[in-house]
Image (tube, rainbow, N blue to C red):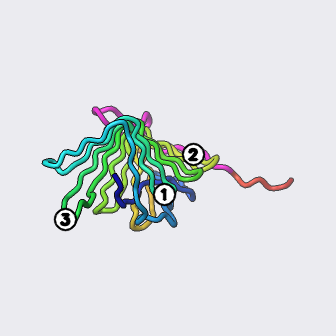
Amino acid sequence: MRRSLPLLAAGAGLVLLGTANAQVLKGHNTSAPVDFSADRIEVQDRADRVVVSGNVQVTQAGLTLTAQRLTVAYHDAKGIEIDRLDASGGVVVTRGDERASGSVAIYDLNRRLITLLGGVQLSQGANRLAGSRLVIDLATGRSTVDGSAASGPSGTSTSSNGRVSGTFKVRQRPN
């Protein structure tokens, strides 16, 4: 099954405030084909969705998303057009040395927004950032990591202290 859709990526240029902002998906080809593979793919035509489960892997132009389950919501207008992707179960998104992970990812293709929830970890090389929610705006390339102790899956807290934390590499200068 192949579809064209953008996915997520974690970025650099992180700024720590109450929330942290990052520029992501710079130069990513969102029109490239998307490949799905999994242990099981079930098409539910009456519900206009596809359920992909078991060792799910989605790739597009250098981006890779892995999860245990992915639900693809679509509509049929001159062929199938994807509206939304919901991934769960150890979601990891990688591109080069960039990596984002969380419990759940929601990708709204119509609004061009990706939201990662639940113990979010964001890294690029030696730089690390952690929070409870990551929102990526694909239209602007801006991402925000939120540290609020919002409720996650099953009503559990997604952040133990409600703050964003990070570690950033400092340029080494000769003494």
Q: CA distance from mark 1 to mark 3?
A: 36 Å
Q: Position of residue 93 (x, y in %)?
A: 47, 47
Q: Position of residue 164 (x, y in %)?
A: 48, 45
Residue appearing at x 48%, y 46% in the figure = 100
Q: Nearer the viewer, residue 35 or 158?
A: 35
Closer mark to the observer between disc 1 and disc 2:
2
Q: Is residue 5 magenta?
A: no
Residue behind mark 2: 128
Q: Which mark is residue 77?
A: 3
Q: Which mark is residue 21?
A: 1
The answer to whether residue 152 is visible is no
Q: From which residue to which does the magenta span run?
A: 149-169
N-terminal of the pair, mark 1 or mark 2, is 1
N-terminal of the pair, mark 1 or mark 3, is 1
| SS for dot 1 | strand
Question: How packed is label 1: few (under 14 Cα within 10 Å), some, or many (20 or more)?
Answer: many
Residue at the far front: name it.
1
